Every structure is written in C-alpha cells, then in structure tokens.
Image (cartoon, rainbow, N blue to C red):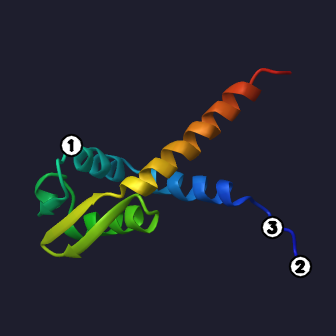
Amino acid sequence: MAKKAFTEEQENLARIAKALAHPVRIAILQMLATQACCYHGDMSEVIPVAKSTLSQHLKELKDAGLIQGEITLPSIRYCINQKNWSIAKSLFGDFFKEIKMNAGSC
C-alpha cells in the first residue's frame, strides 16, 4: 500500500482554505453570520453578483461543509453549518499556533 502524501488534517485545511479563497464567498459567510436563523430569499439582492455566479460560490462553500441549505432559484435557504464551522476554526487555530510557535526558531 502506498504511503499517503498528506494527512487528513492537511487535506481538510486545504479544502476549507480553497472555499474561503474568494471575496464573494467571504461576503456570503459574513452575511450568513449576521442572520438570526437561516437566510431565505434572493441572495443576489444582497450580494451583487449574478445568480449563476452566486450559485457556484454557494456550491463551493457547501461542498467544503461550511454552509448548509438548498438552492431553489430564485429563492435560497442557507445558513452556516455550525458543527463544521467549529471544526474549521479549531483546525485553523491549531495550524496558526503551530506556525507561530515554530516560526523564527532557527
């Protein structure tokens, strides 16, 4: 059996980082974070991008597990996946602590 090139943690961090690597996706997460409950409506009225573009960004965030919900254009029902968001925060927190602790130790 071949040795796995990367750890599961490294793969998870990369998947989440990729999902966060676009300003539209950041705007979506920030908008969802301000909601008392799941957002339901036409998100393109709030975030100034075409519906098809918005749909692609929502799919990327959903595939990464950061949001949950459904697309039934023009209506969208989405919210932050609290469980997976907690995991992401923990992974990145550990990653940044590790980098900080090891940086400059030469």
Q: Earlier in the sequence, mark 1 or mark 2?
A: 2
Label 1 Cα neighbours within 10 Å, binned few <14 / some 14-19 / many ≥20: few
Name the residue at the front extreme: 83
Label 3 Cα neighbours within 10 Å, binned few <14 / some 14-19 / many ≥20: few
Element assignment for label 2: loop
Q: Which corner quadrant holds the N terminus?
A: bottom right
Q: Earlier in the sequence, mark 1 or mark 3?
A: 3
Identify the mark at residue 34; answer none if there is no mark: 1
- Give left or right: position of 46 versus 16: left
Dot 3 corresponds to which residue? 4
- Give left or right: position of 68 versus 106: left
Is label 1 in contact with label 3 (beta carbons under 8 Å)?
Answer: no
Element assignment for label 1: loop
Q: Position of residue 14 (x, y in %)?
A: 59, 55
Identify the mark at residue 1; answer none if there is no mark: 2
The count of marks equals 3
Identify the mark at residue 77; answer none if there is no mark: none
Depth order, front residue of 25/94:
94
Quarter of the view holding residue 54: bottom left
